[in-house]
């Protein structure tokens, strides 16, 4: 889900934003991840069609893109009106790429879905001198830097081995079976596989930095309000159903598990390490918190220090990030990522 590629130049595409103003048909991209599987249910159940009709929209198409980064690149290039992504990816791809984007829905944050696992080690400090398999420049890389910072280490204390998410679990398991001091930083579902290896210990996970790896629905800031209202309304209807203990709720979760390509038990296990914001009031409160500002300061510092702002970026203030209270970190004249709680507030107040 979280592999990062970054854009070195600003996106300058004649057609950006045309979808927003070209009638009443819109496209939203999503990719597989525990916290985003509800979009499969929203599409399959017809919930999205109901909310589109309510706001006079001919069609809102929820499109599955199997390549997470490609979905964000397609959104950045103007092919979609919205896309699911993490807070860090929203900053380093569309925002740095020049696309003015708004975090419309704060869906969840990783609360154990990302972690560091070692063989022959019991703490983060045991990473010193080791080779660590990781998808470099990903949110797992961000997690690693936070863990090191909290334990008096830096990346210079180890050797990072860039490894694809498709191979990372298998390679770790092979190294562990050979008796090597295997180490890995990854996310679910590979995380579940590696932590179950004999002799393996998870020495750090995202529950130790709660609220920092955030999963969102991002839309173009100039998207019309009726689209934003329909998307938020559809999402929280699904959240209400999903979190209920009704037959309908159980069926919704089953559909999501099937869409995810795993078993119901596996999906439920991953939900336990995903802090879902089932209530819009909780999501809005989170978006308005001081903690979010602190998190985005960490995120933009990591992103700039690791080259994700591009070679020509003078400093981490290149892009402005705006919060619900109107405050901005970064360039106030170049705001490209906005956290907006107003539509989540409307859902909480029953005004959608």
Image (tube, rainbow, N blue to C red):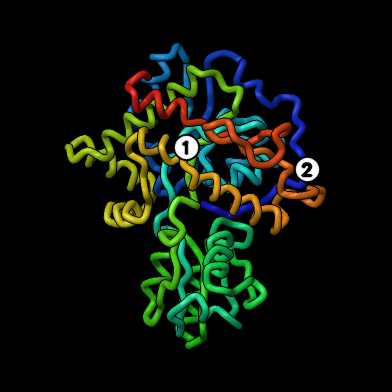
Disc on res. 352: none
- Residue drawn at x 53%, y 46% is 86
Q: Position of residue 299 (x, y in %)?
A: 60, 52
- The answer to whether residue 178 is left or right of residue 319 is left
* Mark 1 lies on residue: 288
> Is the residue 199 above or below the residue 150 in the image?
below
Q: Position of residue 7 (x, y in %)?
A: 72, 46
* Mark 2 lies on residue: 9
- Residue drawn at x 36%, y 41% is 277
> Is the residue 168 above or below the residue 304 in the image?
below
Q: Position of residue 72 (x, y in %)?
A: 60, 41
Between circles 2 and 1, the one closer to the viewer is 1
- Residue drawn at x 60%, y 83% is 129
Image quadrant in which you'd find residue 224: top right
- The answer to whether residue 16 is left or right of residue 290 is right
Element on which disc 2 rests = loop
- Residue drawn at x 44%, y 22% is 229
Image quadrant in which you'd find residue 162: bottom right
Which quadrant does the C terminus fall into?
top left
Of mark 2 and mark 1, the one earlier in the sequence is 2
Element on which disc 1 rests = loop
Let me know if residue 64 appears in the view: no
Q: Position of residue 25 (x, y in %)?
A: 53, 19
| Front-lying residue, 149 or 184 | 149
| Front-lying residue, 83 or 311 | 311
């Amino acid at each position: 889900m979280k592999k990062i590629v970054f854009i070195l130049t600003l996106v300058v595409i004649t057609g950006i934003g045309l979808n927003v103003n070209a009638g009443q048909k819109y496209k939203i991209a999503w990719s597989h991840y525990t916290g985003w599987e509800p979009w499969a249910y929203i599409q399959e159940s017809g919930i999205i069609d109901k909310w589109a009709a309510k706001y006079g929209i001919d069609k809102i198409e929820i499109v599955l893109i199997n390549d997470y980064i490609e979905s964000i690149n397609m959104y950045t290039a103007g092919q979609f009106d919205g896309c699911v992504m993490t807070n860090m990816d929203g900053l380093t791809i569309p925002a740095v790429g020049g696309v003015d984007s708004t975090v419309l829905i704060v869906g969840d944050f990783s609360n154990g879905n990302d972690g560091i696992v070692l063989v022959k080690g019991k703490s983060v400090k045991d990473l010193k001198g080791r080779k660590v398999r990781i998808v470099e420049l990903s949110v797992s890389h961000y997690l690693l830097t936070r863990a090191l910072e909290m334990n008096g280490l830096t990346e210079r204390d180890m050797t990072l081995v860039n490894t694809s998410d498709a191979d990372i679990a298998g390679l770790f398991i092979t190294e562990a079976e050979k008796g090597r001091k295997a180490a890995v930083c990854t996310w679910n579902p590979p995380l579940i596989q590696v932590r179950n290896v004999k002799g393996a210990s998870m020495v750090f996970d995202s529950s130790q930095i709660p609220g920092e790896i955030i999963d969102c629905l991002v839309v173009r800031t100039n998207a019309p309000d009726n689209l934003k209202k329909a998307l938020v309304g559809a999402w929280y209807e699904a959240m209400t159903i999903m979190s209920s203990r009704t037959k309908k709720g159980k069926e919704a979760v089953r559909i999501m598990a099937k869409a995810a390509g795993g078993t119901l038990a596996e999906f439920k296990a991953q939900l336990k390490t995903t802090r879902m914001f089932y209530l819009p009031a909780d999501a809005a409160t989170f978006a308005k918190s001081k903690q979010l500002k602190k998190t985005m300061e960490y995120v933009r510092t990591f992103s700039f220090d690791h080259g994700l702002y591009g070679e020509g970026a003078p400093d981490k203030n290149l892009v402005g990030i705006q919060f619900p209270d109107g405050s901005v970190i970064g360039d106030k004249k170049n705001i490209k990522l906005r956290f907006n709680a107003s539509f989540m507030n409307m859902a909480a107040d029953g005004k959608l």
